[in-house]
Amino acid sequence: MNTTVVILGLTINYINAAMIHTFNKHDILKMNPRYILFIHLVLNDLLLLTTSILLFVFTFTLNTVYVSICLVFLLPAILTSQNTPLNLAVMAAECYISVCVPLRYENICTVKRTCIVIGIIWAISSLTILPDLFILLATEPLQFFQSRVFCETNNVFRSSLSIKKRDATHILFLVVVWITLFYTYFRILFVAKAAASNAKKARNTILIHGCQLLLCMTVYVQPMVTKTLTLFFPVSYIFFVTFIIFQILPRFLSPIIYGLRDKTFRKYFIRTVMCTITIKIHPNKRMMLP
């Protein structure tokens, strides 16, 4: 099971890294807010998947780890998982602006403002984690950080106040994001009735955002599903299956849904991959590549 998870994770991260490399190599992509937001989602997924797989391997190999070590990997995993729905909401808003107010798009969606929004996303996600960390430091004795636990959120942040705060944060995030997606979808739907092909494409893009958000939401129900299934099946197999479905599957679909579906990005991505393969096979042809 460790081998399967690691191989899947390395494969997805390789695809994500190739997309990040494609983005960094072409200025036309780096100057487009849409691709900046997409690459931020890819980078966020790469970090989330890496930390999640490390936690999975530690759990299956060592069973329990020290709380202090668990926190090093658990905090980035929680932070990046909070970033995903916010990033999807911003991507939907960008799509709405490009279709419904195209004349103001270049003034509203600039590279600088996109980077500021990404910073705000990280700040909001960090502010949702800091209270849990403060509650942990205030309520748990020093010996707790030197003890070994099964590295899971509820086993580390076990205060009832943290659990209630976390549930409220998840609900708030999902409500805000769903309102954003519904609003942008129906506004774009009205524009699409004018038979504008780009508006119809944008409408489909918003639907894809909704599907991706549903996949992200499954992370929130993973503990409950896992706890229920362990009543009927072995714990190790249930933990493995739920990890594949709730953690790896959404990360696998993201680059396909957003990257390879886009004609412009797909063109540069294929070109970059083919150039890389050619250079590795025929190093002497490096200077001949366009």
Image: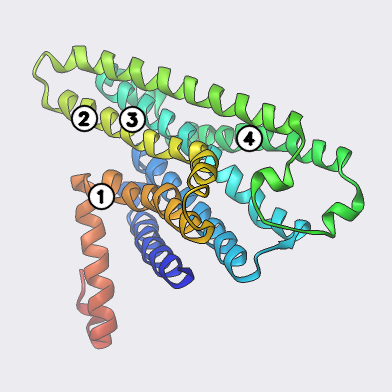
Outermost residue to the right: 142
Q: Which residue is mark 4?
A: 123
Secondary structure of the residue carrying numbered label 2: helix
- Element class at badge 1: helix
- The Cα–Cα distance between marks 1 and 3, rounded to whole angstroms, is 21 Å
At a point 48% along the width and 20% down the height, the residue shown is 175
- Image: 126 above or below 70: above
Give above or below for 33 relative to 239. Answer: above
* Residue pictured at 65% horizontal, 65% vertical: 63
Return the residue at label 2. Answer: 204
Q: Earlier in the sequence, mark 2 or mark 1?
A: 2
Query: Mark 3 highlights which residue?
Result: 210
Q: Nearer the viewer, residue 137 or 257?
A: 137
How much space separates mark 3 and mark 2, taking CA atoms?
10 Å
Q: Residue furthest left?
A: 195
Q: Quickly name the residue at label 1.
A: 265
Q: Amino acid at mark 2?
A: Asn
